[in-house]
Image (cartoon, rainbow, N blue to C red):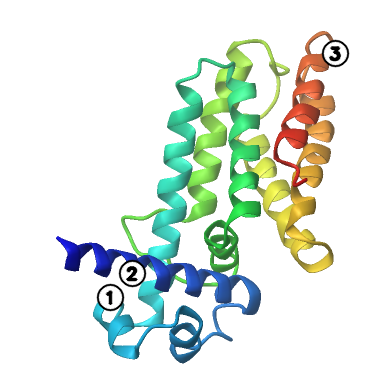
Amino acid sequence: MARQLRAEQTRTTIIVAAADLFDRRGYESTSLSDIVEHAHVTKGALYFHFAAKEDLAHAIMELQSRSLRDLTAEIDARGYSSLETLMRITFGVARQSVEGPIPRAGLRLATGGVAVRPPLKHPFTEFREMATRKLLGAVKESDLHTDIDVDAIAHSLVSFYVGTRIVGRSLEPVTRQPRRLAEMWYVMIRGLVPVTRRAPYLNLATRLEREIRPA
């Protein structure tokens, strides 16, 4: 049992080290030797868990996918409206990105041409499908204009969110991401939500941004 625990701890250490380097340097510019050095493990320890760099990338994307599913299930269970649930999920992902390298590396891998192995879905596809479900629910709950094209809005939401993170990564620290996310929601709420229902959601965007803004 102790040996198995040590093996799991070593695997986690390697994944976190790889995620940190993939996030800061990019996938192509990071070698297995770089990861060994950054993780403070031996090459034998790395190859025991991962036969190739692609396996590490896939492990990171699997963790990212599981994290989104877990976060969605957790927030779904709280009984919020569909639109509030969607907003809270996006801010939850933003919190994870501020707090650790795996979500940041997952985004960089997803935009860097790294192949996604079935049955795992591409992160953007998974995010878009979740957003579509919540947007459909929000239309039924009269929180969105009834004449919107839900598929188009879901695609735009994912593009807006991913683009905000990519641009921010190049121009400002990751700690600025919660503010940029709130700005994104201010724009979307004004365009999608009927006037009589906007105020609570605009206030929610401000509250969520403050909750995860680093001190």
Q: Residue 42 placed where, x, y %?
A: 35, 88
Q: Nearer the viewer, mark 1 or mark 3?
A: 1
Most extreme residue toward the front is: 2
Labelled pair 2, 3 in contact (Cβ < 8 Å): no
How many residues crowd around disc 3 within 10 Å: few (fewer than 14), some, or many (20 or more)?
Answer: few
Say which amino acid is labelled 2: Arg
How many residues crowd around disc 1 within 10 Å: few (fewer than 14), some, or many (20 or more)?
Answer: some
Which of disc 3 and disc 2 is earlier in sequence? 2
Quadrant location of the N terminus in the rendered image: bottom left
How many residues crowd around disc 2 within 10 Å: few (fewer than 14), some, or many (20 or more)?
Answer: many
Q: Mark 1 — residue?
A: 49
Labelled pair 2, 1 in contact (Cβ < 8 Å): yes
Residue shown at 78% from the left, 11% from the top: 197
Which of disc 3 and disc 1 is earlier in sequence? 1
Badge 2 marks a residue whose secondary structure is helix
**Quadrant of the rendered image containing residue 198:** top right
Badge 1 marks a residue whose secondary structure is helix
Mark carried by residue 136: none
Residue shown at 75% from the left, 44% from the top: 178
Residue shown at 77% from the left, 35% from the top: 210
Which of disc 1 and disc 2 is earlier in sequence? 2
Q: Residue 44 placed where, x, y %?
A: 28, 88
Q: Residue 144 placed where, x, y %?
A: 70, 18
Q: CA distance from mark 2 to mark 3?
A: 51 Å
Q: Mark 2 — residue?
A: 11
Q: Mark 3 — residue?
A: 195
143 and 32: which is toward the camera: 32
Answer above or below: position of 98 versus 114.
above
Q: CA distance from mark 1 to mark 3?
A: 54 Å
157 and 30: which is toward the camera: 30
Say which amino acid is labelled 3: Val
